Amino acid sequence: MSAIYRVMFVCTGNTCRSPMAEGALRKLLENRGINGIEVFSSGTGATPMFPATDYAIEACRVWDADISGHHSQPLLRELVEISDLILAMAPAHCHRVLSLDPTAGQKVFLLKNFPEPGCVGEGVDDPIGGSLDVYNRAFIEIGEEIGRILPYIIELAGESEEELPRP
């Protein structure tokens, strides 16, 4: 495959859920030797250049996913346009994507509903302000969903898996 397939995760502040999802997917792709998929994230209410929260960084360490260099970015129409797949953490995020680009309906999904289209359904609870345990539970929930949909993402991207040995 010659073109890069772009997956964007969207949450509110882009310091917790979407960076954790980004880190989890990157790690799973790295473990499989897949590098034709670009993964990034944004937030519907994000202030640019904020780091991921300390607890989000810590929660990602469970999978050896390093998001310590993450910097938040606001959701912009340009990001929607360059994305091939957009996975929203909650219905409001999905609706915001569509308000920026009404033609994005074929590529925006709620993470927990994928591959079912639409913005109606259950979201991932925001751990902001919670304990490390709350962040760990959010990361596990996000990680399980990404693990469930990983074969779909790989197929959509036209990639083939090169299974690498597990540690």
Image: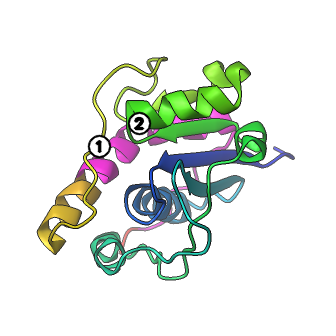
Residue 124, numbered label: 1
* Left or right placement of residue 86 versus residue 59 in this view: right
Q: Which residue is mark 2?
A: 111
Residue at 58% x, 40% y: name it.
Answer: 154
Quadrant the N terminus occupies? top right
Q: Is residue 109 left or right of residue 123?
A: right
Q: Nearer the viewer, residue 13 or 39?
A: 13
**Residue 61 vertical placement versus 72 (above, below):** below
Snapshot quadrant of residue 127: bottom left
Task: Say left or right for 42 vs 139.
Answer: right
Find out whether residue 148 is within the magenta segment. Answer: yes
Q: Circles 1 and 2: CB distance less than 8 Å?
A: yes
Specify start and end residues of the magenta stretch as a single range. Answer: 141-165
Q: Earlier in the sequence, mark 1 or mark 2?
A: 2
How far is the residue under mark 1 from the one under mark 2?
8 Å
**Residue 70 - label:** none
Secondary-structure class at tag 2: loop
Is 156 placed above or below 150 here? Answer: above
Residue 166 position within the rendered picture, expressed as x and y whole percent measured from the top left? 38, 68
Q: Residue at x 48, y 60 (%)?
A: 14
Which color mode does the image show?
rainbow
Task: Point out the frontmost of discs 1 and 2.
Answer: 1
**In-front residue for pair 132/6:** 132
Quadrant into which the C terminus falls: bottom left
* Total numbered circles: 2
Amino acid bearing label 2: Leu
Residue beneath the point at 53% across and 47% down: 44
Residue 149 place in picture, x, y as percent: 43, 37
Q: Amino acid at mark 1?
A: Val
The residue located at (62%, 49%) in the rendering is 75
Few, some or many C-alpha atoms within 10 Å of disc 2 (few <14, some 14-19, many ≥20)? many
- Furthest residue toward right: 2
